[in-house]
Image (spheres, rainbow, N blue to C red):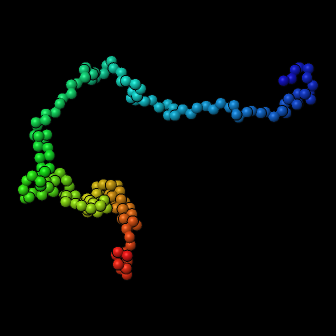
């Protein structure tokens, strides 16, 4: 810096010096994510006991064991071996009552199953358009993939060529 007795030339030299700052030592401010957001739930550590809670936790409830002799548990899997142990009058596929009708007695790949599903769920066009779109997209994808992977049929050559 200049003192009171400095000459004009020295003063001009000081004023015209370029201002240099080192970027290397510049301290960056940290970016604070979600600044101003207040969480409306407790997210740190164990849950506290709130003093005036409308449902205070009095004690840990006892775990109730299910009754193994109730009808649903006792009869679970009773028809699994009906084709082996019983007579051949009942086919196990006839016992599948919880499976949708379009899926009963079905054997095939995913694309064939989705085509059956599309035929059965045709009302999805209006009630569930996004699901209907996803179903059709999956069928189109599988159609292209299966056709790409399978060998092309040429009627001029035998199939075992």
Report which quarter residue 128 is drawn in.
Answer: bottom left
Describe residue 28's horizontal placement relative to residue 80 as left or right. Answer: right
* The C terminus: image quadrant: bottom left
Q: Is residue 88 above or below residue 25?
A: below
Task: Confirm whether residue 144 shows in the render.
Answer: no
Which residue: 38% across, 61% down? 141
Q: Nearer the viewer, residue 159 or 93?
A: 159
Which residue: 36% across, 21% down? 48
Q: Extreme top residue here?
A: 51
Describe residue 117's horizontal placement relative to residue 45 as left or right. Answer: left
Q: Nearer the viewer, residue 144 or 85?
A: 85
Q: Is residue 159 above or below residue 21?
A: below
Residue 131, image x and y in percent? 33, 55
Residue 156, image x and y in percent? 37, 81
Which residue: 52% across, 34% down? 33
Q: Is residue 2 above or below residue 66?
A: above
Q: Extreme front residue here?
A: 161
Which residue: 41% across, 26% down? 44
Q: Nearer the viewer, residue 70 or 156?
A: 156
Task: Confirm whether residue 30 shows in the render.
Answer: yes
């Amino acid at each position: 810096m200049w003192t009171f007795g400095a000459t004009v030339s020295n003063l001009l030299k000081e004023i015209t010096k370029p201002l240099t700052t080192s970027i290397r030592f510049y301290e960056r401010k940290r970016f604070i994510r979600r600044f101003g957001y207040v969480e409306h739930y407790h997210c740190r550590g164990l849950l506290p006991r709130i003093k005036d809670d409308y449902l205070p936790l009095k004690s840990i409830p006892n775990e109730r064991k299910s009754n193994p002799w109730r009808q649903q548990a006792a009869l679970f899997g009773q028809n699994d071996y009906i084709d082996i142990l019983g007579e051949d009058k009942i086919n196990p596929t006839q016992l599948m009552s919880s499976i949708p009708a379009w899926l009963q007695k079905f054997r095939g790949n995913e694309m064939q199953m989705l085509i059956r599903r599309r035929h059965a769920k045709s009302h999805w066009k209006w009630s569930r358009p996004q699901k209907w779109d996803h179903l059709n997209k999956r069928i189109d994808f599988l159609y292209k993939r299966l056709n790409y992977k399978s060998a092309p049929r040429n009627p001029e050559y035998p199939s075992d060529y």
